[in-house]
Amino acid sequence: MILPGATLGMLGGGQLGRMFTVAARTMGYRVMVIDPDAASPAGRIADEHLQAGYEDAAALDRLARECAAVTTEFENVPATTLEVLARRCVVRPGSRAVAITQDRIHEKTFLRDHGFATAPFAVVRSSADLEDAFAELGGPAILKVARFGYDGKGQAVVRNLREAQAAWNAMKHEPCVLEKRVPLDTEVSVVLARGIDNEFALYPVCENTHAHGILDVTVAPARLSAKCVREVQTQARRIAARLEYVGVLAVEFFVSRGRLLVNEIAPRPHNSGHYTIDACITSQFEQQVRALCGLPLGDTRLLTPVAMVNLLGDLWSGGTPRWERILQHPRAKLHLYGKHEPRPGRKMGHYTCLAASAARARAEALALRRGLARKAGRR
Ligand code: ADP
Ligand code: MG
């Protein structure tokens, strides 16, 4: 076990790294963050911020020398970086799991090869592939770049082959997957942790609504039949086992005409798991520290129904939002990530609302959103 007092390394300085840093420092660990951005949310509150890229040899050397264990907050760290570090210190999750989940082609192929249902898809690496894929799937479909897409970026809905070709041209002929657009009853996700000796801890399944491809609202527990919840949990557990995963992992699912389809796997805590900070015995970030350090996993029980709402940069168009609206509510919790530039679509923070039922939590959270933004021109 790596115990408090040790230094933990974090690859990436975004909000997920920041919330990990808060959890780790609360428990008495030191945290060293690598991120090229001087003002990264995690870098600003870490014990040390190495302002460097993820392949910077000197920075990686320092990380390996000083950290007992290293983890990541985003899947786009080069797999070689994890391999280099793994020769010198504990690295969790391993490079194989990250390499699979950072590339949609590998990810979807991995799921298909292991018998998990997904939306019908085909791999696109050439114009001929695109024609074949479209002929096979038909429209409407979604063309998704294999790498570096997030929050609906790097995706285009295409209704015919002409649109598919135009979208692929706009993506500069990067490798892609073409995915059939499936009807959604709802979207759900689950965060889980797997410890070093095969120990599993699953969080409650939560229900997600997206706006413009970006997570908007999460509610826990999800309105799902007990059978469907068990199915989500079984599949997520199997995915983690097949990946030989150690750490915190999130799996996103579509529920389409009553059928469960795996959408995405994230090798890290997840936006839809932020509710665990305020509503569970152990937050997903404390759990990330525990799994990384080889500590026993914490209890994932939900203490109260909860809803989470993301705060995107758009909300700042008329000036700083009226935080007093959220702060006035006795069971609402405001989380801001310390980002200075509120760009449209950028995740600036979130809040949660705790209530006696999931429906109530959702209604109260959505009510708080009304009146949060100031009207443009009146600061
Ligand atoms: P990202 O990496 O941006 O989260 P996703 O593949 O999860 O990419 O897509 C974002 C959202 O777009 C999904 O949560 C869902 O709402 C919608 N979406 C993506 N793929 C499909 C699909 N095949 N059919 C229907 N909706 C989809
Ligand atoms: Mg997604």
Image (spheres, rainbow, N blue to C red):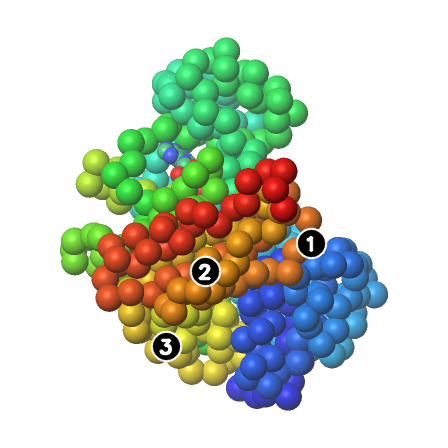
79, 28: nearer the viewer: 28
Q: Residue furthest right?
A: 58
Q: Quadrant of residue 56?
A: bottom right
Mark 1 lies on a secondary structure that is loop
Q: Position of residue 288 (x, y in %)?
A: 50, 71
Label whose residue precedes the other's in the sequence (3 or 2): 3
- Identify which amino acid the numbered label 1 is placed on: His
Residue 224 is marked as: none
Mark 3 surroundings: few (<14), some (14-19) or many (≥20) residues within 10 A = some
Q: Residue furthest top?
A: 162
43, 240: nearer the viewer: 43
Q: Position of residue 203 (x, y in %)?
A: 34, 66
Is residue 339 found left or right of 242 in the rendered image?
right
- Identify which amino acid the numbered label 3 is placed on: Ile
Tell me how far mark 3 sits from mark 2, CA to CA.
Answer: 23 Å
Tell me how far mark 1 sits from mark 3, CA to CA.
Answer: 31 Å
Number of numbered labels in the structure image: 3
Is residue 21 found left or right of 63 in the rendered image?
left
Looking at the image, which residue is at 74% across and 73% down?
Answer: 48
Work out whether 48 lies above or below 324.
below
Q: Position of residue 124 (x, y in %)?
A: 52, 27
- Identify which amino acid the numbered label 2 is placed on: Ile
Q: Which residue is mark 3?
A: 281
Q: Which residue is mark 1?
A: 340
Q: Which residue is mark 2?
A: 326
Mark 1 surroundings: few (<14), some (14-19) or many (≥20) residues within 10 A = few
